[in-house]
Image (cartoon, coloured by chain):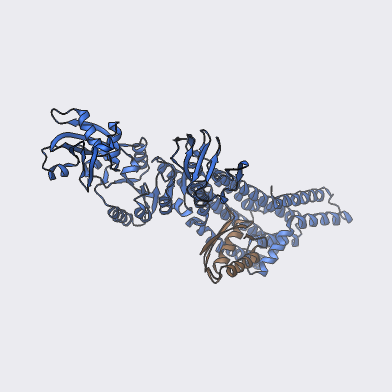
């Protein structure tokens, strides 16, 4: 309990004891009656002094209709009608509710912040007097830090000494270990499970991945959801409306019936019911809890508005390479020409690609296993859009697509293959072809299936050829795809989908974030995948998936749908109970007790309902 | 220029009211008060920022006397 909460708790205790004493005083005429009144009044003042003071201050500052005012009028009215017990108990319960609310909220807040607190507080550096713990903020870019076994890496950098496994669970929500050796880049927030690492920092603390992520999640509460804004606006009209209704209730019926005290009492009940706190508190808590819970699963959501649009996704547009597929190419078949050894074909291709950085070149070199002696390669050039030409050990090797073969007038055998085919020729003679393909991510097909079964239309986009798109789509079970698209085409395609939906539901784009920034920005919901360490993606997207797992799209949607369900539940429940109690109060069926439940009880229940969202899915 | 501050605000209703009040202060371009994170973001002209921030604190204290901004 904080200081303020302890103070409130003490006041509640004292007031409760005074009330109990007052109840024990026998109800007989004479001086004992005054003792009981005095005890009640003391209990009232102890429990309600701050409410009364705030109410007066509220009137002074022009914002009349707040909860303090409502409670003051209701309880003072009850005192005026001679119902002291009621006045004290209403005030007492109101205070208990406030205390409970403050405890529940500060607890949730602590849970959420603990959840998000993946930022290490210290960093180790080596000085002349040995190792020393320092404030990571004070470490400039390019200095050397030490990360012991079991410690979190505080700042992004490059390993200079030591090796071992890193645990990325704090960032991705899954403990997929990553093995690092000197020369590898590491990002802050990972836990070192290997030997002691020396790291040369490449960023400042504030620019490092963990700091960026925390900033993003903290800022999420500034991007308020429509539901939150609606509730604030609603409260502005609701409270004065109820006050006016109470006034009418107190004045109009008694003009005809004459029973003033009955109707004033009903009007006071009205006032107690009318506090909108349940909604004002539980709805931001729901959004904040969901965003906190999502970050624990490695899903960063930038704001409450994004939770809303995630929940109403109707069309999911997914990029192929790197999102649904691994994005890493592998040799899947070798067809040497007649009389050529397969080894010769592969080695020739790998040698020709020695200096190329294209992913296909990497796949070829990896498959060949050997690297050609660089001194043998006397000439190497890229032919844009076709392939490479290299002179290796005196013979000219060509490796590339069919266009290259045609351009060089080489008699070759065409292959029809869904992936990429590399044709190889040596000194004008065709050696054969090598097939290279990209493999699907293990959860890709499952993701597409789950999205489709929850009523989301899935479309796959790719810059690749029609052939390879068709085979990937068939494997995934996606019926809609567009192939051969440039980044600008992707934007206009997503735009056409958005206008097709015409405001009914949202369009999400899922991409790897590196080349897709424009379309991530344009889509209603931009989801960047595998964004660990990619600033551009974190900047452009609304939702950031920290690892490469596409099934997190479904998790994110589930989290947001659950959040919206809780928000709706709370709105309907709180307003429903309040409306019911208002009607019953006006008719004189429900007295002060149901009124207190309608105020405090509803608030407590809806706060608990929102706090459920903190749990991991 | 947008700056973020740690604040102290006691209830969700007050936070909403303070946000409203701050938004209507001349010179404030946008403002958001988060009860959940106990943080406030304020966008205002750079040259007049300190004086605008003072106005904000004054307006907020009128609504909630215990409102505080950590500088």
Q: Residue furthest bottom?
A: B26
Q: Residue furthest right?
A: A31
Number of numbered discs on residues: 0
State the image coordinates of residue A96 (x, y, percent, origin top left): 69, 50
- Residue B64 vertical placement versus A392 (above, below): below
Residue shown at 75% from the left, 62% from the top: A80
Would residue A500 be found to the left or right of residue A184 on screen?
left
Q: Colour of chain A?
A: blue
Regarding residue A259, the answer to whether it shows in the image is no
B47 or A44: nearer the viewer = B47
- Residue A448 vertical placement versus A60 (above, below): above
Regarding residue A39, the answer to whether it shows in the image is yes
State the image coordinates of residue A526 (x, y, percent, origin top left): 39, 51
- Within the image, what quadrant is residue A397 found in? top left
State the image coordinates of residue A286 (x, y, percent, origin top left): 53, 49
Would residue A99 be found to the left or right of residue A454 on screen?
right
Residue shown at 35% from the left, 43% from the top: A323
Q: Which chain is brown?
A: B
- Residue A188 vertical placement versus A59 (above, below): above
State the image coordinates of residue A480 (x, y, percent, origin top left): 27, 45
């Amino acid at each position: 309990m904080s200081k303020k909460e302890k103070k409130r708790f003490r006041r509640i205790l004292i007031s409760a004891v005074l009330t109990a004493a007052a109840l024990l005083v026998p109800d007989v005429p004479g001086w004992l009656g005054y003792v009981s009144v005095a005890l009640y009044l003391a209990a009232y003042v102890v429990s309600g002094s701050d409410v009364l003071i705030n109410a007066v201050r509220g009137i002074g500052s022009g914002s009349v209709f707040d909860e303090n005012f409502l409670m003051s009028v209701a309880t003072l009215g009850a005192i005026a009608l001679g119902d002291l017990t009621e006045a004290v108990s209403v005030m007492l319960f109101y205070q208990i509710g406030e205390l409970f609310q403050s405890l529940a909220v500060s607890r949730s807040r602590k849970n959420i912040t603990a959840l998000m607190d993946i930022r290490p507080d210290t960093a180790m550096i080596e000085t002349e007097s040995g190792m020393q713990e320092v404030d990571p903020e004070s470490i400039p870019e390019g200095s050397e830090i030490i990360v012991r076994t079991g410690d979190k890496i505080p700042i992004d950098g490059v390993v200079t000494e030591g090796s071992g496994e890193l645990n990325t669970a704090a960032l991705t929500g899954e403990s997929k270990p990553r093995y690092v050796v000197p020369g590898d880049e590491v990002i802050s927030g990972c836990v070192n499970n290997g030997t002691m690492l020396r790291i040369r920092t490449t960023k400042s603390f504030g620019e490092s991945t963990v700091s960026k992520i925390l900033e993003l999640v903290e800022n999420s509460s500034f991007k308020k959801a429509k539901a939150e804004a609606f509730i604030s606006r609603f409260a502005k009209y609701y409270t004065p409306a109820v006050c006016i209704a109470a006034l009418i209730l107190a004045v109009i019926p008694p003009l005809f019936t004459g029973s003033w005290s009955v109707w004033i009492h009903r009007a006071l009940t009205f006032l107690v019911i009318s506090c909108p706190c349940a909604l004002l508190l539980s709805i931001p808590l729901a959004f904040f809890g969901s965003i906190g819970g999502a970050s624990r699963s490695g899903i960063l959501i930038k704001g409450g508005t994004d939770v809303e649009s995630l929940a109403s996704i109707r069309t999911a547009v997914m990029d192929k390479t790197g999102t649904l597929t691994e994005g890493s190419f592998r040799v899947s078949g070798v067809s040497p020409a007649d009389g050529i050894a397969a080894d010769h074909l592969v080695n020739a291709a790998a040698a020709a690609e020695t200096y190329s950085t294209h992913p296909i070149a990497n796949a070829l070199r990896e498959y060949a296993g050997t690297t050609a002696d660089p001194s043998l390669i006397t000439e190497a050039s890229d032919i844009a859009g076709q392939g490479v030409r290299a002179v290796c050990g005196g013979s000219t090797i060509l490796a590339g697509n069919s266009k290259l073969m045609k351009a060089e007038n080489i008699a070759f055998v065409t292959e029809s293959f869904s992936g990429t085919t590399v044709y190889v020729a040596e000194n004008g003679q065709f050696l054969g072809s090598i097939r290279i393909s990209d493999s699907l991510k293990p959860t890709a097909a499952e993701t597409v299936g789950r999205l489709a079964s929850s009523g989301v239309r899935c479309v796959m986009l790719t810059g690749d050829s029609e052939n390879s798109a068709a085979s990937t789509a068939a494997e995934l079970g996606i019926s809609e795809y567009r192939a051969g698209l440039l980044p600008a085409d992707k934007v206009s395609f997503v735009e056409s989908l958005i206008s097709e939906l015409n405001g009914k539901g949202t369009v999400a784009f899922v991409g790897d974030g590196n080349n897709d920034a424009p379309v991530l920005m344009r889509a209603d919901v931009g989801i960047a995948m595998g964004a660990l360490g990619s600033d551009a993606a974190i900047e452009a997207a609304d939702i950031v998936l920290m690892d490469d797992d596409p099934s997190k799209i479904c998790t994110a949607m589930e989290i947001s749908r659950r959040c919206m369900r809780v928000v709706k539940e709370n709105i309907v429940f709180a307003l429903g109970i309040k409306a019911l109690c208002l009607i019953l109060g006006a008719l004189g069926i429900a007295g002060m007790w149901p009124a207190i439940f309608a105020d405090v009880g509803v608030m407590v229940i809806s706060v608990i309902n929102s706090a459920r969202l903190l749990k991991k899915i | 220029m947008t700056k973020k501050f740690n604040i102290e605000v006691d209830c969700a209703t007050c936070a909403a009211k303070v946000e409203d009040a701050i938004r209507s202060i001349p010179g404030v371009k946008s403002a958001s008060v988060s009860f959940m994170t106990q943080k406030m973001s304020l966008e205002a002209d750079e040259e007049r920022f300190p004086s605008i921030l003072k106005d904000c604190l004054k307006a907020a204290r009128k609504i909630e006397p215990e409102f505080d901004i950590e500088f």
